[in-house]
Image (cartoon, rainbow, N blue to C red):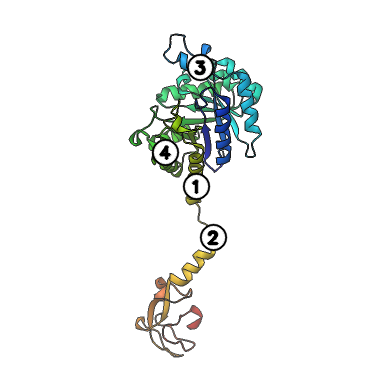
């Protein structure tokens, strides 16, 4: 995957069943520069039983496939086009997501032990973002194996503490990195910090600095609306600031390999690094002693102090004024 942290704008249920709100969220994610927008696509009757406590709410906000298709077209009409990730909960919606041409899939942690849905998604051959919060290592390994037994789909592990909003001490960035190393798959952090809190910004940035490959962050049309999924969501303008902050952290990370000195660093070395200079006026023919040499900043790059022993006992080939550089070419 790219060296740049992949940023996913998670719409979740923030559309509240209103496609116009969905379009506002898409506009905000695109203007912010998100790499992907995530749709949660479901048919409620194929996802939960009628007497489930969330059935009525989910029924009220369920978008039709026609509405989802229109929202997908709106994504592709943006000046900054994002990839569409479909978080699917049942097999029928996988078929629909294939019809509209989504770029990747997310398996919700509630379906991590559902081989029928996982294999259905894996058969598409598209990348699978495997949500592993609140799951055992055995469950994660089993789900990965189901995918690998079915296709060559790329796998991203997505970890988030399943509580909204998440407390800072429940995040466990070190555990995310352990998962990446253990399963040898890219790791993503699903941030569920309170949207109005400072940690909603600095925690994902810290995760990016620690080396996570993907960041998933909720976005809403207006958090003050206090609708579904609003607790951990950012408003569009806040999401822009979030993306900017992450990109700044990436720029600060740089590269692990040594790099050529920049012009600024060359100037710093010239002006600040210390060199060997004459401690007094010296004349041609003088044999240098330690007392003849001083260590100073000299506005130029000369012999570093660690090479003083190479000058002691050698004869000068020219006069050198006090506090001027002594070079290797100045001695016999």
Residue depth check, mark 4 versus mark 3: number of the one nearer the observer: 3
Q: Are marks 1 and 3 in contact (CB under 8 Å)?
A: no
Dot label at residue 60: 3
Element type at marker 3?
helix
Residue in the picture at 53% in, 62% down: 262
Question: Label 1, label 3: how many angstroms apart (C-alpha)?
Answer: 41 Å
Q: From this viewpoint, is residue 114 visible?
A: no
* Quadrant assignment, res 148: top right
Taking depth in this image into account, of 175 and 69 the one nearest to the observer is 69
Locate the N terminus by quadrant: top right
Q: Are marks 3 and 2 in contact (CB under 8 Å)?
A: no
Element type at marker 4?
helix
Residue 330, above or below 70:
below
Residue depth check, mark 4 versus mark 1: number of the one nearer the observer: 4
Residue depth check, mark 3 versus mark 2: number of the one nearer the observer: 3
Q: From this viewpoint, is residue 133 visible?
A: yes
Residue position for label 4: 200
Residue position for label 1: 250
Question: Label 4, label 1: how many angstroms apart (C-alpha)?
Answer: 17 Å
Residue 331, above or below 133:
below
Residue position for label 2: 260
Element type at marker 1?
helix
Whichever of callouts 4 and 3 sits on the residue coming sooner in the sequence is 3
* Quadrant assignment, res 101: top right
Q: Position of residue 42 (x, y in %)?
A: 54, 18
Q: Position of residue 124 (x, y in %)?
A: 62, 22
Residue depth check, mark 4 versus mark 2: number of the one nearer the observer: 4
Whichever of callouts 3 and 2 sits on the residue coming sooner in the sequence is 3
């Amino acid at each position: 995957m790219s060296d740049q942290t992949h940023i996913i704008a998670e719409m979740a249920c923030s559309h509240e069943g209103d496609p116009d709100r969905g379009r506002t969220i898409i506009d905000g994610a695109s203007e912010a520069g998100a790499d992907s927008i995530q749709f949660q696509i479901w048919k409620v009757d194929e996802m939960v039983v009628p007497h489930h406590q969330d059935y009525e709410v989910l029924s009220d906000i369920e978008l039709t496939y026609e509405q989802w298709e229109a929202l997908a077209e709106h994504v592709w009409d943006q000046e900054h086009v994002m990839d569409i990730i479909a978080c699917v909960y049942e097999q029928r919606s996988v078929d629909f997501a294939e019809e509209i041409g989504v770029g990747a899939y997310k398996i919700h942690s509630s379906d991590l032990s559902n081989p029928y849905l996982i294999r259905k998604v894996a058969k598409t051959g598209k990348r699978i973002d495997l949500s592993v919060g609140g799951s055992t290592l055995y469950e994660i390994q089993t789900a990965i194996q189901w995918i690998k037994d079915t296709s060559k789909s790329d796998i991203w592990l997505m970890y988030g503490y399943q509580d909204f909003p998440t407390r800072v001490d429940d995040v466990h960035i070190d555990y995310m990195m352990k998962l990446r190393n253990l399963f040898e798959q890219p790791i993503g952090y699903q941030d569920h910090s309170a949207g109005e809190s400072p940690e909603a910004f600095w925690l994902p940035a810290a995760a990016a600095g620690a080396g996570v490959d993907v960041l998933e962050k909720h976005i809403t049309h207006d958090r003050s609306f206090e609708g579904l999924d609003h607790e951990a969501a950012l408003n569009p303008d806040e999401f822009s600031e979030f993306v900017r902050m992450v990109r700044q952290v990436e720029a600060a990370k740089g590269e692990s390999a040594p790099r050529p000195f920049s012009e600024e660093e060359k100037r710093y070395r010239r002006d600040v690094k210390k060199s060997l200079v004459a401690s007094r006026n010296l004349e041609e023919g003088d044999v240098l002693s330690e007392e003849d040499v001083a260590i100073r900043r000299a506005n130029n790059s000369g012999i570093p102090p660690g090479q003083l022993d190479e000058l002691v006992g050698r004869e000068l080939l020219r006069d050198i004024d006090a506090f001027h550089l002594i070079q290797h070419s100045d001695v016999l």
